[in-house]
Amino acid sequence: MKTIVIVGGGAGGLELATRLGRRIGKSGRAHVILVDRAPTHFWKPLLHAVAAGKIDPNMHHIDYAVQAANNHFEFVCGNADMIDRASRIVEVRPYASERGCTPLPVRRIRYDRLVLAFGAVTNFFNIPGAADHSLALDTVQQAEFFRKRFLMRCMQASAAHAGANESGAAVNIIIVGGGATGVELAAELKQTVQALAQYKVHSLDAARDIRIRIIERADRLLPFLSPEISRAAARQLQRLGIEVCTNTSVARVDSDAVVDSSGTHHHSSITVWAAGVEGPDLCARLGLRLNRNKQIRVNNSLQTLDDPNIFAIGDCANVVCANSSVAVPPRAQAAHQQAKFLADILADMPAQPEEQRLPAFSYRDYGSLISLGQFGAVGVLLGAFGRRELHLSGAAAQAMYKLMYQRHVLSLLGFARMMEQALMHWIRARMVSPVRLH
């Protein structure tokens, strides 16, 4: 019985493990093992909502152990610190135990096929001070840290009776990067600011004393999306009072300011870095070929260029479309398509993959949607009506945005449990405040 090990339980890795478990794990044709450092799965596109306090992450977690038991694969919690390609062994090191407890031993897992799906981390582009003085939103823990620090900054300014100062505001939030994460976080934070004022958490003027500013190097927001979506998002942010600085490059980040290439100091109480991603350090330790962002280069079948027994999907992989020669963007829909494609490949792969020519992966872009919180959403759907683009905004776009998450839950839990979870969230939303206050 062959063993398939998947390292990383993100949108692509968990869906792949679930599909393979249902297809070949249940019948005993293969032993499917999922490795992840965390005990639970959280859909990464919702991290901006956690940072703004809009959702409780504990209500959106999926326990890996429960998912494994229900879908016929094994889950191992720990860090994949080393991969021995010659012996086909993954070394998984558990987290350090509590003080005084005997640490757990390193587990060595042998594989026949290995799938790397451990995602990406924030790319600070070697900007001086960026890694030291900026917050990233790669994990739930980082999003929760930002939320608590933001609440603390607001309450400290309120307790000190600090109104507008020389920087123009008592609390300044700088978001570096005008991509999807930066735009969505800015819009959600605006709603959080209004809710905090409504519930008297602070005595600051929501419009005057709390400033949110986006700094983007390109000439427009959302530079990887269509100009129509970019303009629509910019107009909505400006109506919300969010400042947008385009054509602005960051030279360095200080503890209390972001300095751009022209020498202008943008005063900052909290700086969030959302300007790009790169492969984690593990990528560089595998001896596999990488691109300039430390992502693993793969062929058209998602196999690494240096080892036919190792595949890579999701944000840690550099996938180039066979039909367009363009790199697949780091999006959840790309990870979903790659997981579906690779599940079919691995389920029927012979003992020696190099002896068979595998089919090529083809990415289909279904469009993009950007959430603006309670203020709606903007986006475009591709292929909805033949080759025509369907531009959406407002409530219709917001409904479609929510359906993307439900589709993810559907692929993992099935229709009945998806509906149960959606009903639970709907009821909870009417029983608690719209923003987490603790």
Image: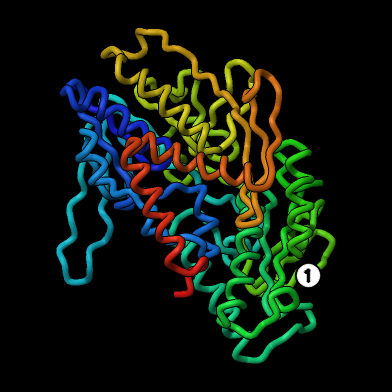
The residue under the point 28% across, 46% down is 64
Q: Is residue 63 above or below residue 58?
A: above
Report if residue 57 is visible in the image. Answer: yes
Q: Is residue 8 above or below residue 130?
A: above
Secondary element type, mark 1: strand
Residue 249 percent location from the top left of the image: 77, 54
The residue under the point 79% across, 45% down is 231
Q: Is residue 337 above or below residue 33?
A: above
In the rendered image, which quarter is residue 312 located in? top left
Name, please, the residue furthest toward the right.
262
Colouring mode (rainbow / by chain / secondary structure / one colour): rainbow
In the rendered image, which quarter is residue 185 located in? bottom right
Tell me the residue that label 1 is attached to: 265
**Can you say which quadrant of the picture contains the N terminus?**
top left
**Can you say which quadrant of the picture contains the C terminus?**
bottom left
Q: Is residue 8 left or right of residue 402?
A: left
Q: Is residue 351 left or right of residue 410?
A: left
